[in-house]
Amino acid sequence: MRVFGFLLVLGALTWGAVQLADNPGSVAITWQGYRFTSSVGVLLLMVAAIAVLWSLLSGIWRWLRTSPGRFMEGRAGRRRERGYRLLTEGLVAAAAGDAKAARRIGAKAGQLIQTPLNLLLLAQAAQLNGDEAAARRYFEAMLAHGETEFLGLRGLIVQATKAGDWEAARRHARRAYGLRPETEWLSSVLFDLEARAGDWRAAQKILEAAIKAKLVDPLDGPRRRAVVLAERARMAQSEGAAEDALALARAAHKLDHGLVAATAIAARLLAAQGKARAAAKLVEAGWKCGPHPDLAHAYAAIAPDEPALERTRRFERLHALNPDHPESRIALAEAALEAELWGEARRHLKAAVGERPTQQVYGLLATLEERQGGDPEAVRRWLLRAANATPGAAWLCGKCGAASDHWRARCNACDAFDSLAWKLPPITPARATEGAIESLAPAAHASLEPPSPAVDAAPSRE
């Protein structure tokens, strides 16, 4: 097409030249008494020459008129390019931990360019140098620029967290969350800050949004939701809002049957409303996942005035759901002890001793001997065993190991979320030494056993 166009233009010019050569014509111009006569071809050449000259003069004029501006723009561009190059070098120095070089390069870059990124470099240099006050000023200055507002807020969140100013950290995190709600680290930080402040309703909203945005592991999401709902139920119950507590606890139990706190709260509140069957179903579902004393107490509270023998039969059904767990044996043994079924209680307590020789089990054996009217010396020996035994299971934090008197969503010691688990405390070196001595001295160990008739030939009301 280009060749065709070129040939077409060339043909038109050739045809025009031939026409002018065959028909030169004449042109006469009269002006101020002067007369100019020429052919048409010459006139066209003169017009073309004048057009070329005009174009040349116009170009020279434009160049002269715009040269200062273009010179200044070029100079500014070179300064900007050098400034950004220095800014890049400064950020690299800051990432490498060279505070001195980062601060020096940041000052040079600030002389060449005025950009919010330079504030970030200076803030990082100040942090590396340990000047938190200067870093805070730079971070706050970054808030005035849209492109660095989020980074400034992140810096302020980190500073407030280090200083333990949780309210300031939460305030900055909320503002940052309004800018970028789908940022994974921010969602996690704000959730922790809301939970630390006790605003579990806000924490739940953050968690729901994170789950919807797929920022939380799909396998972990239901558990986290259940823990938040259980904590809200616990707080509602403490405030006397029974209806809200029941709704929240049942929702948490539906998400995770093994969440003891939610199951126990829901069962007790249902029992208080006279819904014994629904309460029993909740406890039994939770017992299958993992027996716990709180569940046993909630199960007993379903019918607080029932005869001891009927309660024992109910606990036999509960025991059958998880028969090999020590808590199942202990719960049934306690019910049998109340019903004065000495043989049944002894059988389950002896099995529990073999699985979990704790202070609680030995204490129950001592109670059994005392209530059965046995030898006072046997009671003393069981109590001695209890004094030297491992403490029973408790709510222990998986992060710091601290114990809590009851379940809560966060550890009181380290504020870790969903870190409390019902388990036996670790064996201390002293306990381990005692166990080794007992294993090396079976005769001494046997001397602490109650008399044989009290253990194996005691009368039973079964």
Image: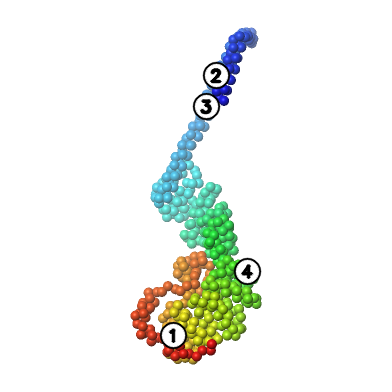
Residue position for label 4: 247
Image coords of residue 47 (percent x, y): 59, 16
Amino acid type at image mark 3: Trp
Q: Residue 382, labelled with which disc?
A: 1
Give the label, 3 or 2, closer to the camera.
2
| Mark 3–mark 2 distance (CA, rounded to whole Å) | 15 Å
For badge 2, the amino acid type reads: Leu
Camera-nearest label, 3 or 4:
4
Q: Mark 1 and mark 4: span between their CA atoms?
A: 44 Å
Answer with mark 3 or mark 2, whichever residue precedes in sequence.
2
N-terminal of the two: label 1 or label 4? 4
Say if 167 sits above or below 271 in the image: above
Give the position of the C terminus as an image quadrant.
bottom right
The vertical placement of 213 against 1, above or below, is below
> Which amino acid, by three-letter code, is at mark 1?
Trp
Give the residue number, with chain letter if any, for mark 2.
Answer: 53
Label 4 environment density (alpha carbons within 10 Å; few <14, some 14–19, many ≥20): some
Look at mark 3 in the image and give the residue it sits on: 63
| Precedes in sequence: disc 1 or disc 2 | 2
